[in-house]
Image (spheres, rainbow, N blue to C red):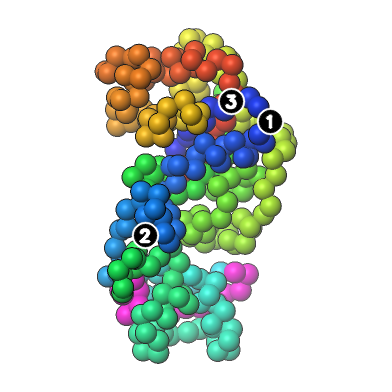
Amino acid sequence: MFSVAYVILQIGDIAPVDAIRASLAPFQSRGRRGASDNGFIFDDNTEELRQAYEAQFTFSDRGGGELAIEGDFEASGLLDHERVREEMRRRGRQIWHVRFADFIDLESFFTRFSIGVDRGLRSGTYGQWLNPLGRWDFWELGGVFDGHIIGQPSQRTRLGVSRISSGQSWDRMLLSKLAGSACKSFDQPVSAAFDDRSARNFESCATLLADALADREHAFPESLVLPPGSAADSLRWLDALPKPGPIEAFARLGLALDAKWDEVVEEIYMRFEDHWVAAIAYHH
């Protein structure tokens, strides 16, 4: 699911891509090995990995980076499709009927063919490090909300490739594969330059405040992200739904705990009127 967030940026010498990434980094949903040091919680998915390990699959390499899969669709989400294709090429097969448990052990399967899975601190456990503050699996500037922040949406409906994004992720690759796109298309160098499409996804807080006071719909995003240092990270990401919050952030801002979302948004724009705002599409 995609939503739009407005990321408030302090004007300075930091390149836009670096400023946006730094602001959003604390809210990445999943971490990597050792993430427990950063307060992440381990979600044990050993049984899900074992399900993929023991499932019967039929892989068909259709060329052009497309791999057709028959079998346990849910379990196939833990498979690194490119590594499966490499193994098929090594074996000289375009069609491969396989049950991984028949020729390798679980640890080897995890190392060679899994994606989006990490090893737990306890021996023999596999899963994901989850961030209690997590909001996004990946994001990109504008994305499916290209132009939304300036009131000129481009009506994009498909996953795109933004020059400013969170980069490659297994979630993004999986969605891309399901959409019939090659995951390698996302492996592009990130540019901090403002091209024409980038500029459509930035606006000043002052302009957005005027738009909000005029009750223009595009001034009210689903989420607002306050600048780093303005509050604790747990209070920087504000959401409209399922109800405006977190209320602890409202107290810090001097707002009523039951403040309406339009009141929150207008107050934020007034507080940071000399800042810029970037609109991102984030997947969660």
Residue 59 falls within the magenta-colored stretch: yes
Q: Is the residue marked by circle 2 packed among few (<14), some (14-19), or many (20+) residues within 10 Å?
A: many
Whole-Å distance between the Cαs marked 1 and 2? Answer: 36 Å
Foreground: 38 or 104?
38
What percent of the width, then of the height, locates residue 252?
35, 20
Relative side of 45 to 22, left or right: left
Residue in the picture at 57% in, 79% down: 86
The magenta stretch is 49-65
Relative side of 41 to 13, left or right: left
In the picture of the structure, the residue carrying the numbered disc 1 is: 13
Residue in the picture at 40% in, 42% down: 135
- Residue 162 lies, with reference to residue 93, above or below; the image says above
In the picture of the structure, the residue carrying the numbered disc 3 is: 10
Q: Is the residue marked by circle 1 packed among few (<14), some (14-19), or many (20+) residues within 10 Å?
A: few
In the picture of the structure, the residue carrying the numbered disc 2 is: 128
Query: Circle 3 sits in a helix, a strand or a loop, which is it?
Result: loop
Going by the numbered disc 2, the residue's amino acid type is Gln
What percent of the width, then of the height, locates residue 233?
41, 34
What percent of the width, then of the height, locates residue 170?
49, 59
Foreground: 100 or 118?
118
- State the image quarter where residue 241 is shown: top left
Residue 104 is labelled as none
Query: Circle 1 sits in a helix, a strand or a loop, which is it?
Result: loop
Residue 263 falls within the magenta-colored stretch: no
Circles 3 and 2, Cβ within 8 Å, touching? The answer is no
Can you see residue 56?
no
Going by the numbered disc 3, the residue's amino acid type is Gln
Whole-Å distance between the Cαs marked 3 and 2? Answer: 33 Å
